[in-house]
Amino acid sequence: MKVIDGVLGVEKVTPAEAQARFQVCFSCPHYNEAKRKCRICKCYLDVKTEQKFHREPTRLGAIERTHCWLAKWPGDNLKEVNAYRKLKGLTEIIN
Ligand code: SF4
């Protein structure tokens, strides 16, 4: 069931993890408070912060472990985020 949930993008992180992610967004200059969206990835953060995996629209729905594109969220792995960035044609980031 977990694998299917991951593929469908419905498997969620814990509420505490989602809250910790959103706390970072609240203080991020790229957070659009009016729309509750990220200006970098364009995602609705009420949804994105809860997701463990998702289908990435910029990569034809490829499955990704949900992360901040700038690797700012707790638990984000810089190496993995940079691998996803490379697949999107974005430059590597250094935190
Ligand atoms: S997802 Fe990352 S870049 Fe976007 S608002 Fe949150 S912390 Fe900032």
Image (cartoon, grey):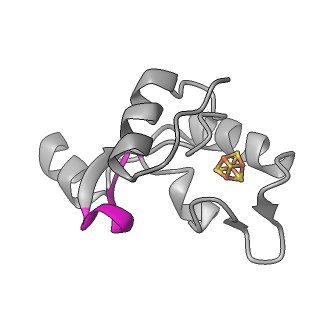
Q: At 64% from the left edge and 59% from the top edge, which residue is drawn?
A: 40
In x, y percent, where is residue 80?
40, 28
Quarter of the image where one finds residue 9: bottom left
* Chain part drawn in magenta: 52-61
In x, y percent, where is residue 93?
59, 32
In x, y percent, where is residue 23?
77, 42
Residue 77 in sight from this viewpoint: no
Left or right: 1, with 11 as reference point: left
Counting the numbered discs, the total is 0
Q: Quadrant of the C terminus?
A: top right
Quarter of the image where one finds residue 33: bottom right
Which one is nearer the viewer's eye here, 47 or 76?
A: 76
> Quick check: is 9 in the magenta stretch?
no
Which one is nearer the viewer's eye here, 90 or 9?
A: 90
Left or right: 28, with 87 as reference point: right
Q: At 56% from the left edge and 66% from the top edge, which residue is drawn?
A: 43
> Quick check: is 57 in the magenta stretch?
yes
Q: At 55% from the left edge and 45% from the top edge, which residue is drawn?
A: 69
Task: Please identify the residue farthest to the bottom as the structure is shown.
Answer: 35
Q: Is residue 69 above or below residue 8?
A: above
Left or right: 95, with 32 as reference point: left
Quarter of the image where one finds residue 17: top right
Q: Is residue 84 above or below residue 59?
A: above
Q: Quadrant of the N terminus?
A: top left
Residue 81 in sight from this viewpoint: yes
